[in-house]
Image: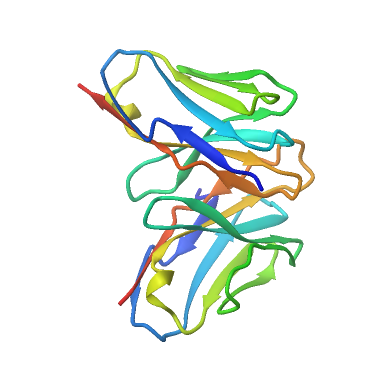
Amino acid sequence: KQEVTQIPAALSVPEGENLVLNCSFTDSAIYNLQWFRQDPGKGLTSLLLIQSSQREQTSGRLNASLDKSSGRSTLYIAASQPGDSATYLCAVRTGANNLFFGTGTRLTVIP
Amino acid sequence: DTAVSQTPKYLVTQMGNDKSIKCEQNLGHDTMYWYKQDSKKFLKIMFSYNNKELIINETVPNRFSPKSPDKAHLNLHINSLELGDSAVYFCASSQWDRVDNEQFFGPGTRLTVL
């Protein structure tokens, strides 16, 4: 059964720092991996989606990488801002169109 | 132009009651989902509907029943509510045959059972 883990569970950084969030999954037979952002009391916003055949995707200050064979993905956030404070979730899609979510990393960017 | 919408946003009810949560998507997608986010913030799939047919049921109690009147709607009915049903429920949609099958999520419904 697919299990998705995110490390660290919480992270606090001063504004302007670059940071990396980690995601690992146990079954490498995935179709894609999605990174989401969730603000307190809000829904999920899709940030980046990486197909299983891709190595990375970039959107603005965000860069997500995927190493399918080792079951790992990272989300790199450059020049962090207070507005980046949120919980970041990664999810992998299996053949059944099911999304398995990680436990999330709660990011706080301190002004 | 809300892509995936849910009503109500908050729902507070007593144990034993029956309640429904509605979900609508205007993206033209053919697949809709219900997820449950528990108190530890862990998100887990409950149901998936493709063209009005149930394709996933992740061992959810049969007190929960999804109902899809058409492709754009997937409602969640819950009978005999229990304390453990308190959670945030998210609806999502996607296009099944798209290569990336990116899922788009609604804002969530926070259910509190007293």
Residue shown at the point (58%, 53%) measured from the top left: B92
Q: Residue furthest left?
A: A111
Please identify the quarter of the rendering in which residue A73 is found.
top right
Residue shown at the point (39%, 68%) measured from the top left: B86
Q: How is the image coloured?
A: rainbow
Q: Nearer the viewer, residue B57 or B4?
A: B57
B10 shown above or below B82: above
A53 shown above or below B105: above
Residue shown at the point (70%, 29%) measured from the top left: A51
Q: Residue furthest right?
A: B97
Residue B91 image position (x, y, % from top left): 54, 57
In the rendered structure, the answer to whether residue A96 lies left or right of residue B68 reads: right
Please identify the quarter of the rendering in which residue B81 is found.
bottom left
Please identify the quarter of the rendering in which residue B59 is found.
bottom right
Residue shown at the point (62%, 57%) measured from the top left: B33
A75 shown above or below B86: above
Q: How many marks?
A: 0
In the rendered structure, the answer to whether residue A61 lies left or right of residue B65 reads: left
In the rendered structure, the answer to whether residue B109 lies left or right of residue A101 reads: left
Q: Nearer the viewer, residue A41 or B60?
A: B60
> On the rendered image, what quadrant is the C terminus of chain B found in?
bottom left
Residue A100 image position (x, y, % from top left): 60, 46
In the rendered structure, the answer to whether residue B2 lies left or right of residue B11 reads: right
Residue B109 image position (x, y, % from top left): 42, 62
Residue B64 image position (x, y, % from top left): 56, 75
